[in-house]
Image: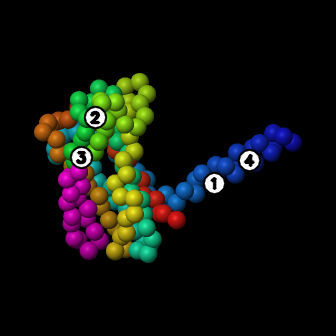
Amino acid sequence: MLQKLLIVSAFALLLASCSDDVIYEKTLDIPGESWVYGDTLKFDFDIVDTTKTYSLLLDVTHAGDYGFQNLYVQFHTIFPSGKKETKLVSLELAAQTGIWNGECSGNECNVEIPLQSKAVFKETGKHTLAIEQYMRKSPLPGLKSMSLKIKVLK
């Protein structure tokens, strides 16, 4: 009986943890773990409700021996209407002290970077977030993958 109770409790906990209102999550690997200027990472997602507020999070996975404290990228947001906005952003991967932000294990580090904490979309439909590396080096070694997660805020 105790075993059944533990299984039911674990299943209930799993269901509760899956209901964190994530509407989109996708990971894109960087070919050869070396990002060249021409390789644009594209995330396509649908927005169906313009009355809600969203949180956009970017997970960056990089090697522990990545050669820089930050990563300059250009974000290109393409809206369903065709309108395009571009923004240059410095993603801070390490503190000023040189210690990596996020969590590291072996020679791999992962840092979750909030892109927007209270985003509002004015259009429904397919949106694209394209990311280009904007460092002074190409190819840029030590970058493994990026993940975009979009959550509905309560």
Identify residue for label 1.
Answer: 16
Disc assigned to residue 96: 2
Q: Residues within 10 Å of mark 2 (few under 14, many from 20)?
A: few
- Three-letter residue code for mark 1: Ala
The residue segment tinted magenta is 74-90
| Classed neighbour count for the residue bearing mark 4: other residues with Cα under 10 Å, few (<14), some (14–19), many (≥20) | few
Quarter of the image for the N terminus: give it.
top right
Residue 112 left/right relative to 75: right
Report how far apart the C-alphas of labels 4 and 2 lie in the structure.
44 Å
Q: Is residue 107 left or right of residue 17?
A: left
Q: Position of residue 92 (x, y in %)?
A: 29, 42
Residue 90 image offset from top left, x and y in percent = 24, 46
Mark 3 to mark 4: distance in Å? 43 Å
| Residue 101 - label | none
Query: Gap in Å between the C-alphas at discs 3 and 1?
Result: 35 Å
Amino acid beneath label 2: Gln
